[in-house]
Image (cartoon, rainbow, N blue to C red):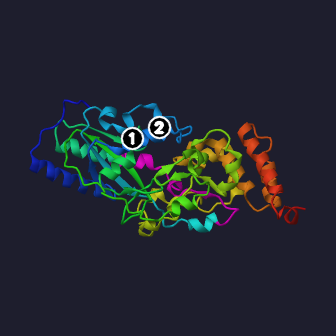
Amino acid sequence: MPSNATPSLSPTAIAQLKDQVKQWAKELGFQDCGIASTDLGQHKSHLANWLDAGYHGELEYMSRHGTKRSNPAELVPGTVRVISLRMDYWPESAAAAEQILGADQKAYVSRYTLGRDYHKLIRKRLAKLGQKLTEAVANSNYRVFVDSAPVLERGLAELAGLGWIGKNTMLIHPQAGSYFFLAELFTDIPLPVDQPFSSKHCGSCRRCLDLCPTQAFVGPHLLDARRCISYLTIELKGSIPEELRPLIGNRVFGCDDCQLVCPWNKFTRPTTEQDFSPRHQLDRQEMIALFAWTEEEFLQRTEGSAIRRTGYAGWLRNLAVALGNATPSEAVIRALQSRADHPSVIVREHVTWALVQLKRHPLYRDRIV
């Protein structure tokens, strides 16, 4: 985005364009749209302190790009505004999350990834919004981002008035909770900015902090990713620390617990996007059935899904841990034993752990002949 292409518009025209952008966003399926400046203020220092503490673990991409993550104009020269957008993803047709978490033979998959990968869908919508901007303002430039570059999306969304960052580090909207995707459009058009949320509305509530299965929160607004189940089951490529494995339960891809207990999510609005509806019954699948998938079946059934991110060996690793946390049965034992000689060292290690874990279960002798 050339820095010398900043369009010159009258104040009236710019105000009208801002209203038009928000209307276009709604027509494209976004539930909300706000305009932020490029000054991330305190969010910069918070990110720097978080990285210095090592809370990002193996998320090297969080520190790889220097200050670009907290300086939009450094990432895309010429940027003067960031259009921040959100899109609801909660699938109304999915099995009740709490019910699946309470059924230790079933696999819990984070609700944002039950359907098709959101990246492509949202990116296409953003591109259409960008095209409308260039048609409205000659010589203007834009770039769109959906988890595809070092962008401090929650900080920008808070600045754009889309909500506040809660104690669980999620962006929370007072009329929509937190089950939504965020995306950004960087532009060189000096649109009027929206008012950020002046205060956070979590009050004295600390349910998310207290009920996190692995106690991943160091304190309010401060997450140690190295203990977060989403990090452990998606981003971590090696062995899951043994002391954390029993705490993962049946969560095989991601974790929603800090959102499930948030009172603001009583205002959650189900998605209207069919692409976010569950596929392959991943909202209620038996762990043994998923553990039996061959690599070809895994690739076929996760095509166009964010689950691909963990890879087949990571998928089996996660399921082995979850099976080790299940109530012992001959079927569970047989399933684990079938992978005892898997080519992956990581898979074999976690299968071995799971079998030992099951033998320690108080019901093992009663259930296994």
Q: Nearer the viewer, residue 212 or 60?
A: 212
Q: Nearer the viewer, residue 232 or 139?
A: 232
- Residue 10: where, in percent of width, then height? 9, 45
Q: Nearer the viewer, residue 354 or 289?
A: 354
Q: Residue at x 61, y 54 (%)?
A: 214
- Give the quarter of the figure containing the N terminus: top left
Q: Which residue is mark 2?
A: 62
Q: Residue at x 51, y 67 (%)?
A: 93
Residue 284: name its quadrant: bottom right
Q: Nearer the viewer, residue 180 or 121?
A: 180
Position of residue 134 in the picture relative to residue 275 (left or right): left
Q: Which residues are the magenta region?
A: 102-125
Indicate which label's residue lies in the foreground, 1 or 2: 1
- The mark nearer the N terminus, 1 or 2, is 1
Q: Amino acid at mark 1?
A: Ser
* Residue 60 falls inside the magenta stretch: no
Q: Which residue is mark 1?
A: 45
- Residue 200: where, in percent of width, then height? 37, 59
Q: Residues within 10 Å of mark 2 (few under 14, many from 20)?
A: some
Q: Is residue 252 above or below residue 329?
A: above
Secondary structure of residue under mark 1: helix
Can I make out residue 308 in this image? no
Q: Residues within 10 Å of mark 1 (few under 14, many from 20)?
A: few
Q: Amino acid at mark 2?
A: Met
Q: Residue at x 51, y 55 (%)?
A: 115
- Residue 197: where, in percent of width, then height? 31, 57
- Residue 57: where, in percent of width, then height? 56, 39
